[in-house]
Amino acid sequence: MKDIFNKAAGAAKFIKQQIDDLGELCIITGSGLNPILESFTIIKSIAFSRIPHLRDATFHKGEFLVLEHEGKRYCALNGRLHYYEGYSAAEVAFPIRILFCLGVRKLIMTNATGGLQSHYEPGQIVMVKDHINLLPDNPLRGYNESNFGPRFPDMSDAYNKEWRQTTLELAKSQNINLEQGIYACFQGPSLETPAEYFYLNKIGADLVGMSTVPEVIAANHCGIKVLVFSVVTNVCMPIEDITPTTVESVIEVANRAIPVLKKLVFGSL
Protein backbone atom coordinates (compact mmCIF):
# COMPACT_ATOMS: atom_id res chain seq x y z
CA MET A 1 0.00 0.00 0.00
CA LYS A 2 2.35 2.71 -1.27
CA ASP A 3 -0.31 5.37 -0.86
CA ILE A 4 -1.24 4.39 2.70
CA PHE A 5 -0.16 7.74 4.15
CA ASN A 6 -2.22 9.71 1.63
CA LYS A 7 -5.24 7.52 2.33
CA ALA A 8 -4.87 7.90 6.09
CA ALA A 9 -4.39 11.65 5.72
CA GLY A 10 -7.47 11.83 3.50
CA ALA A 11 -9.56 9.94 6.06
CA ALA A 12 -8.27 12.24 8.82
CA LYS A 13 -9.13 15.31 6.74
CA PHE A 14 -12.70 14.01 6.33
CA ILE A 15 -13.03 13.57 10.10
CA LYS A 16 -11.58 17.02 10.83
CA GLN A 17 -14.13 18.54 8.45
CA GLN A 18 -16.82 17.12 10.76
CA ILE A 19 -15.14 18.20 14.01
CA ASP A 20 -11.65 19.54 14.62
CA ASP A 21 -11.08 19.34 18.38
CA LEU A 22 -10.76 15.66 19.30
CA GLY A 23 -7.85 15.47 21.74
CA GLU A 24 -4.64 13.44 21.72
CA LEU A 25 -5.85 10.23 23.41
CA CYS A 26 -8.03 7.52 21.86
CA ILE A 27 -9.85 4.60 23.47
CA ILE A 28 -10.57 1.39 21.53
CA THR A 29 -13.25 -0.91 22.92
CA GLY A 30 -13.28 -4.69 22.65
CA SER A 31 -16.12 -7.23 22.62
CA GLY A 32 -18.75 -6.38 25.24
CA LEU A 33 -16.66 -3.48 26.55
CA ASN A 34 -18.22 -0.47 24.82
CA PRO A 35 -20.20 0.48 27.99
CA ILE A 36 -16.99 2.10 29.30
CA LEU A 37 -17.81 4.95 26.90
CA GLU A 38 -21.18 5.66 28.54
CA SER A 39 -19.62 7.96 31.15
CA PHE A 40 -18.40 10.30 28.41
CA THR A 41 -20.48 12.88 26.59
CA ILE A 42 -20.58 11.95 22.91
CA ILE A 43 -19.89 15.05 20.82
CA LYS A 44 -19.76 13.38 17.40
CA SER A 45 -20.29 9.91 15.95
CA ILE A 46 -19.09 8.83 12.48
CA ALA A 47 -19.70 5.31 11.19
CA PHE A 48 -16.64 3.51 9.82
CA SER A 49 -18.55 3.06 6.56
CA ARG A 50 -18.61 6.84 6.03
CA ILE A 51 -14.88 7.38 6.50
CA PRO A 52 -12.89 7.27 3.23
CA HIS A 53 -10.60 4.25 2.72
CA LEU A 54 -11.65 2.64 6.04
CA ARG A 55 -13.14 -0.84 5.97
CA ASP A 56 -16.46 -1.41 7.73
CA ALA A 57 -16.69 -3.59 10.84
CA THR A 58 -18.74 -6.77 10.45
CA PHE A 59 -18.80 -7.92 14.10
CA HIS A 60 -18.45 -4.77 16.20
CA LYS A 61 -20.54 -1.64 15.65
CA GLY A 62 -17.67 0.26 14.06
CA GLU A 63 -17.86 3.98 14.70
CA PHE A 64 -15.45 6.85 15.34
CA LEU A 65 -16.48 8.95 18.34
CA VAL A 66 -15.42 12.31 19.68
CA LEU A 67 -15.96 12.40 23.44
CA GLU A 68 -15.84 14.90 26.27
CA HIS A 69 -15.20 14.35 29.97
CA GLU A 70 -14.60 17.02 32.60
CA GLY A 71 -13.98 19.63 29.94
CA LYS A 72 -11.41 17.60 27.96
CA ARG A 73 -11.80 16.06 24.51
CA TYR A 74 -10.93 12.48 23.61
CA CYS A 75 -11.75 10.20 20.72
CA ALA A 76 -12.73 6.54 20.59
CA LEU A 77 -13.18 3.66 18.20
CA ASN A 78 -16.35 1.91 19.28
CA GLY A 79 -15.35 -1.51 18.01
CA ARG A 80 -12.49 -2.60 15.78
CA LEU A 81 -11.62 -4.59 12.68
CA HIS A 82 -10.31 -8.16 12.91
CA TYR A 83 -8.12 -10.38 10.75
CA TYR A 84 -10.81 -13.09 10.85
CA GLU A 85 -13.23 -10.74 9.09
CA GLY A 86 -11.13 -11.27 5.97
CA TYR A 87 -9.07 -8.11 6.23
CA SER A 88 -5.27 -8.00 6.01
CA ALA A 89 -3.25 -7.00 9.05
CA ALA A 90 -2.58 -3.65 7.35
CA GLU A 91 -6.32 -3.05 6.92
CA VAL A 92 -6.96 -4.02 10.54
CA ALA A 93 -4.33 -1.51 11.66
CA PHE A 94 -5.39 1.26 9.26
CA PRO A 95 -7.51 3.06 11.92
CA ILE A 96 -4.27 3.60 13.87
CA ARG A 97 -2.77 5.32 10.83
CA ILE A 98 -5.78 7.63 10.74
CA LEU A 99 -5.43 8.37 14.46
CA PHE A 100 -1.79 9.33 13.93
CA CYS A 101 -2.79 11.76 11.18
CA LEU A 102 -5.38 13.20 13.55
CA GLY A 103 -2.70 13.97 16.13
CA VAL A 104 -3.47 11.13 18.54
CA ARG A 105 -0.36 10.14 20.51
CA LYS A 106 -1.77 7.95 23.31
CA LEU A 107 -3.95 4.89 22.94
CA ILE A 108 -5.91 2.90 25.55
CA MET A 109 -7.16 -0.42 24.18
CA THR A 110 -9.44 -3.04 25.70
CA ASN A 111 -10.19 -6.60 24.64
CA ALA A 112 -11.89 -9.80 25.77
CA THR A 113 -9.52 -12.74 26.14
CA GLY A 114 -9.10 -16.34 27.14
CA GLY A 115 -7.08 -16.74 30.34
CA LEU A 116 -4.15 -19.15 30.23
CA GLN A 117 -3.31 -19.15 33.93
CA SER A 118 -5.26 -21.42 36.27
CA HIS A 119 -5.53 -18.75 38.98
CA TYR A 120 -7.34 -16.32 36.67
CA GLU A 121 -11.06 -15.84 37.25
CA PRO A 122 -13.78 -14.84 34.74
CA GLY A 123 -14.10 -11.07 34.69
CA GLN A 124 -10.54 -10.47 35.92
CA ILE A 125 -8.68 -7.59 34.27
CA VAL A 126 -5.07 -8.14 33.22
CA MET A 127 -2.85 -5.36 31.88
CA VAL A 128 -0.86 -6.48 28.84
CA LYS A 129 2.92 -6.08 29.13
CA ASP A 130 3.99 -7.86 25.92
CA HIS A 131 2.63 -9.97 23.08
CA ILE A 132 3.28 -12.96 20.85
CA ASN A 133 2.12 -12.42 17.28
CA LEU A 134 0.77 -15.70 15.88
CA LEU A 135 -1.06 -14.11 12.96
CA PRO A 136 0.27 -15.11 9.52
CA ASP A 137 0.70 -11.42 8.71
CA ASN A 138 2.19 -8.17 9.99
CA PRO A 139 0.68 -4.71 9.36
CA LEU A 140 4.12 -3.38 8.38
CA ARG A 141 4.75 -6.00 5.69
CA GLY A 142 5.47 -4.47 2.30
CA TYR A 143 6.40 -0.90 1.45
CA ASN A 144 7.43 1.18 4.47
CA GLU A 145 5.89 4.64 4.68
CA SER A 146 8.56 6.73 6.44
CA ASN A 147 5.98 9.41 7.31
CA PHE A 148 4.73 6.90 9.89
CA GLY A 149 7.99 5.41 11.09
CA PRO A 150 11.19 3.45 10.34
CA ARG A 151 11.48 0.25 8.31
CA PHE A 152 12.42 -1.78 11.42
CA PRO A 153 10.69 -0.25 14.45
CA ASP A 154 11.85 -1.33 17.90
CA MET A 155 9.25 -3.27 19.90
CA SER A 156 11.08 -3.63 23.22
CA ASP A 157 8.60 -1.29 24.95
CA ALA A 158 5.50 -1.90 22.84
CA TYR A 159 3.28 -1.55 25.93
CA ASN A 160 4.67 1.62 27.48
CA LYS A 161 6.41 0.65 30.72
CA GLU A 162 6.12 4.08 32.36
CA TRP A 163 2.37 4.24 31.69
CA ARG A 164 1.94 0.70 33.01
CA GLN A 165 3.77 1.60 36.20
CA THR A 166 1.56 4.60 36.93
CA THR A 167 -1.48 2.40 36.21
CA LEU A 168 -0.28 -0.23 38.69
CA GLU A 169 0.05 2.51 41.31
CA LEU A 170 -3.46 3.72 40.47
CA ALA A 171 -4.85 0.18 40.82
CA LYS A 172 -3.12 -0.28 44.18
CA SER A 173 -4.54 3.00 45.49
CA GLN A 174 -8.04 1.77 44.62
CA ASN A 175 -7.54 -1.77 45.95
CA ILE A 176 -7.77 -3.28 42.47
CA ASN A 177 -5.84 -6.50 41.96
CA LEU A 178 -4.24 -5.74 38.58
CA GLU A 179 -1.83 -8.31 37.20
CA GLN A 180 0.27 -8.02 34.07
CA GLY A 181 0.44 -10.65 31.35
CA ILE A 182 1.58 -11.61 27.86
CA TYR A 183 -1.08 -11.64 25.13
CA ALA A 184 -0.96 -14.08 22.21
CA CYS A 185 -2.94 -13.32 19.05
CA PHE A 186 -4.51 -16.10 16.96
CA GLN A 187 -6.36 -15.37 13.73
CA GLY A 188 -9.76 -16.92 14.63
CA PRO A 189 -12.69 -16.92 14.26
CA SER A 190 -12.74 -20.44 15.74
CA LEU A 191 -11.78 -20.52 19.39
CA GLU A 192 -8.62 -22.37 20.32
CA THR A 193 -8.49 -26.12 20.93
CA PRO A 194 -7.32 -27.55 24.28
CA ALA A 195 -4.02 -28.50 22.62
CA GLU A 196 -3.57 -24.92 21.42
CA TYR A 197 -4.30 -23.55 24.91
CA PHE A 198 -1.68 -25.93 26.29
CA TYR A 199 0.83 -24.85 23.63
CA LEU A 200 0.22 -21.14 24.28
CA ASN A 201 0.73 -21.61 28.00
CA LYS A 202 4.00 -23.46 27.39
CA ILE A 203 5.42 -20.73 25.13
CA GLY A 204 4.79 -18.07 27.77
CA ALA A 205 1.39 -16.58 26.95
CA ASP A 206 -1.00 -15.62 29.74
CA LEU A 207 -3.84 -14.45 27.50
CA VAL A 208 -5.15 -15.30 24.04
CA GLY A 209 -7.37 -13.34 21.70
CA MET A 210 -8.00 -12.40 18.07
CA SER A 211 -7.22 -8.68 18.05
CA THR A 212 -5.02 -5.89 19.39
CA VAL A 213 -1.57 -6.99 18.13
CA PRO A 214 -1.80 -5.47 14.61
CA GLU A 215 -2.93 -2.17 16.12
CA VAL A 216 -0.16 -2.21 18.75
CA ILE A 217 2.49 -2.85 16.10
CA ALA A 218 1.19 0.02 13.94
CA ALA A 219 0.92 2.33 16.96
CA ASN A 220 4.53 1.69 17.93
CA HIS A 221 5.60 2.26 14.32
CA CYS A 222 3.93 5.68 14.54
CA GLY A 223 5.31 6.53 17.98
CA ILE A 224 1.93 6.28 19.72
CA LYS A 225 2.10 5.17 23.37
CA VAL A 226 -0.07 2.15 24.15
CA LEU A 227 -1.88 0.84 27.25
CA VAL A 228 -3.96 -2.35 26.98
CA PHE A 229 -6.45 -3.92 29.39
CA SER A 230 -7.63 -7.49 28.76
CA VAL A 231 -10.76 -8.86 30.42
CA VAL A 232 -10.53 -12.61 31.01
CA THR A 233 -13.89 -13.88 29.78
CA ASN A 234 -13.15 -17.62 29.80
CA VAL A 235 -10.50 -19.50 31.74
CA CYS A 236 -8.65 -22.05 29.60
CA MET A 237 -6.39 -23.70 32.16
CA PRO A 238 -6.20 -26.37 33.47
CA ILE A 239 -7.12 -28.16 30.26
CA GLU A 240 -9.35 -30.76 31.94
CA ASP A 241 -11.62 -28.01 33.31
CA ILE A 242 -12.33 -26.28 29.98
CA THR A 243 -16.03 -25.82 29.17
CA PRO A 244 -17.63 -24.71 25.88
CA THR A 245 -17.53 -20.95 25.23
CA THR A 246 -20.05 -18.86 23.31
CA VAL A 247 -19.93 -15.27 22.10
CA GLU A 248 -22.91 -14.53 24.34
CA SER A 249 -21.06 -15.77 27.45
CA VAL A 250 -17.96 -13.76 26.49
CA ILE A 251 -19.98 -10.55 26.23
CA GLU A 252 -21.86 -11.28 29.46
CA VAL A 253 -18.64 -11.75 31.45
CA ALA A 254 -17.03 -8.72 29.78
CA ASN A 255 -19.98 -6.56 30.82
CA ARG A 256 -19.51 -7.61 34.45
CA ALA A 257 -15.99 -6.19 34.43
CA ILE A 258 -17.11 -2.72 33.29
CA PRO A 259 -17.20 -0.97 36.72
CA VAL A 260 -13.57 -1.85 37.53
CA LEU A 261 -12.45 -1.28 33.94
CA LYS A 262 -13.95 2.22 34.04
CA LYS A 263 -11.88 3.07 37.11
CA LEU A 264 -8.70 1.96 35.36
CA VAL A 265 -9.48 3.71 32.08
CA PHE A 266 -10.56 7.00 33.63
CA GLY A 267 -7.60 6.93 36.00
CA SER A 268 -5.27 6.49 33.03
CA LEU A 269 -6.58 9.39 30.92
Image: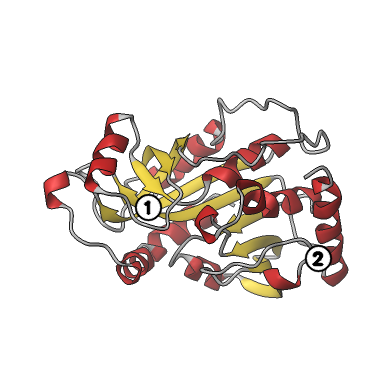
Any part of residue 103 in sight:
yes
- The N terminus - image quarter: top right
Circle 2 residues within 10 Å: few <14, some 14–19, many ≥20:
many
Any part of residue 175 in sight:
no
Badge 2 is on which residue? 15
Report the residue at 56% width, 29% height from top.
157
Query: N-terminal of the two: label 1 or label 2?
Result: 2
Q: Quadrant of residue 201?
A: top left
Circle 1 residues within 10 Å: few <14, some 14–19, many ≥20:
many
Report the residue at 84% width, 47% height from top.
3
Q: Nearer the viewer, residue 240 or 35?
A: 240
| Residue type, mark 1 in image | Thr
- Could you tell me residue 265's position as x and y percent? 51, 55
> SS at mark 1?
strand
- Could you tell me residue 69's position as x and y percent? 64, 66
Badge 1 is on which residue? 113
